[in-house]
Image (cartoon, rainbow, N blue to C red):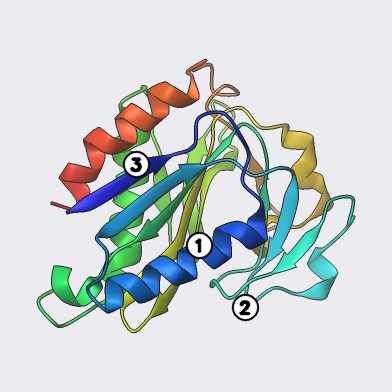
Amino acid sequence: MIEWKIEKEQVVGYDAAVDAMEKRVADIRNDDADEMIWLLEHSPLYTAGTSAKDGDLLDDRFPVYKTGRGGEHTYHGPGQRVAYVMLDLKERQNAKPDLRKYVWLLEEWIILTLAEFGIKGERRDGRVGIWVVGADGAENKIAAIGVRIRKWVTYHGIAINVNPDLSHFSGIVPCGISEHGVTSMHDQGKNITMHELDCALQKTLKLSFP
C-alpha cells in the first residue's frame, strides 16, 4: 500500500525533506511504515548530485545543496512539482531489484501523466529525464529524474515543470546538458493547476507501478 502525502499550501525546506525521506526509508525497510509518495514544492534552490561538475554551477544565486541522489545539477522551485518516491523494490520486483527497470518505470509514469494533458514526453538515449520536441525540432527537458537507493528502498525521485520561472535554470547546466533547453507544461500551452497534475499522477501511477 502506498501512502500519498501532498503539500498544498507551503514549500518544504530541502534539508527537512531529505531528513524526512531518510527516516521514512528506514521505517519502510524495517516494516514500520508503508511505502510513500510525497508531492511538494521547494523554494528556489539548486541540488548537486553525485556526478555534478563544479563548472556546471554558473551562478549560485540560490542555495546549493550537495545531495546523495544520482545525476548532476538540478533546479527546484515554485511551480515545479517534486515527487519523492519511497518504494521497496525487493517487495515490488520479487526479490530481484532492478535499478534500470525502476528508472524506466519512473520515466513511463511521467510520460503517461503528460499524455493526460496532450503533451508528448519522450525518452532520449544517454539523456536522463523526459523531453518535449517543439515545432522547430528543438528538444527541451520538461521533467528531471534523480534517485537514490538504500537497501533497495528508493528515495528522491522526479520533478515536473508545471510553471516554474524558467530563467532560474540559467544558473546551472541542467543535468550537465548544455545543448538543449528546458520547458514547462504552461510553456507548452497547457495551463493546468498543480492539483490537476497531482490527480493525474495518482491516476497514472497505477498503470506504471501496478
Query: Residue 137: x percent and y percent?
Result: 56, 35
Query: Residue 82: x percent and y percent?
Result: 51, 46
Mark 1 is surrounded, within 10 Å at the Cα level, by few (under 14), some (14 to 19) or many (20 or more) other residues, namely: few
At label 2, the amino acid type is Thr
What residue is pinned by disc 2? 50
Report helix, strand or loop for mark 3: helix
Q: Is residue 118 above or below residue 149?
A: above
At label 3, the amino acid type is Ile
Please tell me the numbered disc located at residue 20. Answer: 1
Residue 141 quadrant:
top right
At horizontal 31% and vertical 61% (from top left) the residue drawn is 104
Q: Nearer the viewer, residue 126 or 49?
A: 49
Report helix, strand or loop for mark 1: helix
Sequence order check, earlier mark of 3 and 1: 1
The mark total stands at 3
Please tell me the numbered disc located at residue 8. Answer: none
